[in-house]
Image (tube, rainbow, N blue to C red):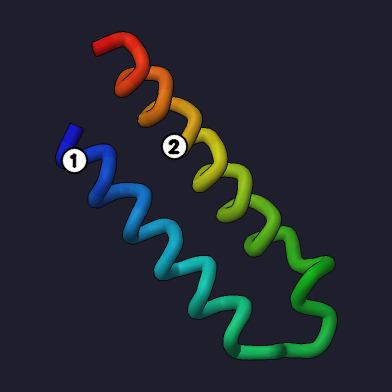
Amino acid sequence: MESMRKSILVLQSDLNRQLISGKPGLFNNKAVYSLSLKLDKEIVKYYKKVMNH
């Protein structure tokens, strides 16, 4: 569980760093979209695991 939480924190940090950069066209950026999807998937896996314990 701890490794999942760390993974989520790293993904959140990476995504925040990208969003804070404020680069033009950032919200249409494939990398930001992909990172956001990874974060969502990790959060879902984490909460499913928490709910089953």
Q: What residue type is labelled 1?
A: Ser
> What residue is drawn where x is 50% and y is 47%?
39
Instruction: Give percent across and percent down for residue 45.
Output: 42, 26
Crowd around label 1: few <14 · some 14–19 · many ≥20 (10 Å): few
Indicate left or right for 33 with 2 as reference. right
Q: Position of residue 8 (x, y in %)?
A: 36, 49
Say what amino acid the circle numbered 2 marks: Glu
Residue that label 1 marks: 3
Residue on which the image places disc 2: 42
Q: Residue furthest top?
A: 52
Which residue is found at the position 19% from the left and 32% from the top?
1
Looking at the image, residue 22 sits to the left or right of residue 46; the answer is right
Which of 17/1 is in front? Answer: 1
The image quadrant where one finds the C terminus is: top left
> What's the residue at 52%, 73% (across, down)?
16
Q: In this view, does 20 lie above or below 30?
A: below
Q: In this view, does 11 lie above or below 44?
A: below
Q: Distance between the residues labelled 1 and 2?
A: 11 Å
Front residue of this view, candidates 49 and 20: 49
Along the polypeptide, which appears first: circle 1 or circle 2? 1
Task: Identify which residue, 27 or 29, lies in the foreground.
Answer: 27
Q: Position of residue 32 (x, y in %)?
A: 65, 63
Q: What element carries label 1?
A: helix
Is label 2 in a helix, a strand or a loop? helix
Label 1–label 2 contact, CB within 8 A? no
Residue 6, horizontal then vertical, whole percent = 24, 51
Image: 40 above or below 35: above
Please give left or right for residue 24 compared with residue 36 in the image: right
Residue at 62% over, 78% down:
19
Mark 2, other Cα within 10 Å: few <14 / some 14–19 / many ≥20: some
Q: Residue 40 carries which label?
A: none
Q: Looking at the image, which residue sits at the far left?
A: 2
